[in-house]
Amino acid sequence: MKSKSAFRRSELDGNVKPTDDFFQFANGKWAERHAIPATESIWGPFHILWKKNLERLRILLEDISEGRVEEGGRELVLLRDYYRTAMDRAMANALGSSPLTPFFDDVNAVATIQDIVALMARFRKAGIGGPWTVTAYRDLKEGDLVKLSFGQGGLGLPEKTYYLSDDPATRKVRDAYRKHVEKMFRLANIEGDARESADTIMEIETALARVSRTNAELRQIENIYNERTIPALEREVPGVNWRMYLSELGAPPLDTVNIEVPEFMSTVSSLFQSIPLQKWKVYFSWRIITSGASFLSDAFAREQFNFWGKVVSGTKRMQPRWRRVAHDIDGTVLGEVLGKFYIQRHFSESAKDYVRTMVAYVKEAFKERVSSRPWMGEATRAMAIRKLDAVKEKVGYPDTWRDSSRLQLTNASYYENSVQVSRFEFEDMLSKVGKPADRQKWFCSPQTVNAFFEEELVSMTFPAGILQPPFFDPERDEAVNFGAIASIVGHELTHGFDDQGRKFDENGHLEDWWTPEDKEAFLERTRAFEAQIGTYRIIDDVYANGALTIGETVADLGGLVLAFYAMQKFFAEKGRPRLVNGLTPEQRFFLGYALIERSKFREERLREIAITDPHLPSYWRVNGVLSNMSEFFDAFNGGPGDKMWRPENERIEIW
């Protein structure tokens, strides 16, 4: 058994009893020694590792740009041309807002609302947003076909609450946003009064916010699945010439589409009639500006940062240009292209084998847990195991890489190349509509520091980016690895059985496979968990939103429980390890979990997270979850009177 430790005993805060505040016990000394860098709003393992990966991407991109990478053909040329143009700061500053001019000309040429509708379609292909989003999705109820979906959109602030709340903190952000819009209009040199333009943007976006659903409401998957035939869509949203719009979009022939939020779409139709055309022209000018600011001159990038970085997130200093460019590349098809070179330098095939072993142990632990849940009947139990057996994992990088051969770059400017990438991405998405879904498709780059569960595909993804310390180290003490990477495996697997994932069957279709009694028993537990989460104070008088965070918190708790019992199964087969630094394997397991959750937050970012993020801040992902685990109290000899202690009848246990 391996004994390499991820921490020293001296790094733990001995002044704090583990069962009083485990987050402080495990991470307090780390927090004292590590300040949040000026360029960040959160600082912790995910962000530290992502920053390290960006450094690796920078070296790769510079090697490619300077001709130090020889094998790669056309893909090398794409990466080289995009990176060189993006890094040409002098050219971006000389061009100013001029790359936006063709799109502003399109707006100025608009004469009717239906011209606006056609413009929206063309803009969407270029990566310029409008009142609604356009995405492709695998049919949720039958078959395996990819279909087109329209969702609510059009807001410049993170969520509807920012427009409608009278809370002083959100009102402050809203006031700053109005000033930000005004400054951006001035930078773009658009004719007209910038202050009036900002008022128009607030008017239209506030009207959209009033009929938008909250992030918590959007989590209810069955409520955003509303298929419509094209004639029905025309009746329900009559202010839009849908056949013309779909034609301009380049969509294939469609019998049906999905409308995620019907009341939002019908209201947009009404707003097209009630709000003057000139105001809509101002609105779409703003969409051009805000979507393109990151790719323009320093003045635009600074103003974008001054609002989003400083005001919304509390960040003190803008990221250097190379880091912003590397992050941009990673979020597009070019990120996967770059990933081919990344895994050659930074990923070991042995890591893939190790993680697949971890997955097998966690799945076996889940099967045993499902088989022993007293609240679940035999019929539902059998279906749960059937779904569990169907879950596939993707580890490291794709087996089949995306084809980027149709991507053409102009090299005229960073902005124009970004538009070309957006057009490629959109056309690639549309090319999948009407065809069977690709169940092996990846939705992130190999270097991503994260992991995912895809309900529709019944699969988990563990990119190469996260399969390294502190999340995973093949030479490290197994107990710590189980607390770290195995808890992430368990987290993603539990998403298939959380409050939303449980609604999908083993084929990834929305199917109610639960008996009424078992469904109610599950909901009784999640309702109790929601209520408990609502007592977690985030900052000042801001508390966690149970309805928004319940899915991720069920996955946190379920994932940690599964990882714990997977570890016990592993030790039963391989032998129980000795003490390391005076700590038992169980204690090291929980420390391994706390290690990957250690983070510090700026106040502004905490407030944003409380409104928009389905994940709890790290303090509660540790202390909130562990306060429900008898295994934790057993490991650290906890009992009544400890600050984290919950009586057994108040602890939440689902999986």
Image: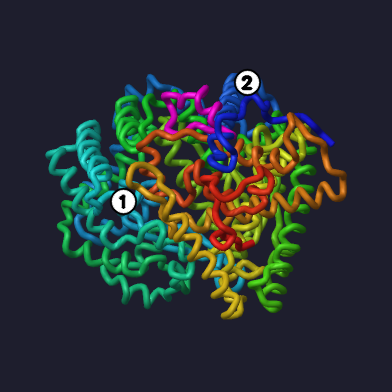
Q: Which residues are magenta?
A: 26-46
| Residue furthest to the front | 641
Look at the image and tell me whether residue 594 can be seen.
yes
**Mark 1 sits on what residue?**
155
* Kind of residue sitting beneath label 2: Gly
Q: Residue at x 36, y 56 (%)?
A: 121
Q: Could you say whether the residue bearing mark 2 is in a helix, strand or loop?
A: loop
Quadrant of the image containing the N terminus: top right
The verdict on residue 188 being magenta is no
Q: Find residue 403 and report its horizontal and vertical position in percent.
A: 62, 46
Q: Nearer the viewer, residue 607 or 152?
A: 607
- Residue at image position (28%, 72%) is 238
- Quarter of the rendering occupied by the C terminus: bottom right
Q: In the image, what residue occupies the spot 52% across and 22% down? A: 33
Residue bearing mark 2: 67
Amino acid of disc 1:
Leu
> In the image, residue 205 lies at what x, y percent?
25, 52
The answer to whether the residues at label 2 and label 1 have Cβ atoms under 8 Å apart is: no
Q: Quadrant of residue 68?
A: top right
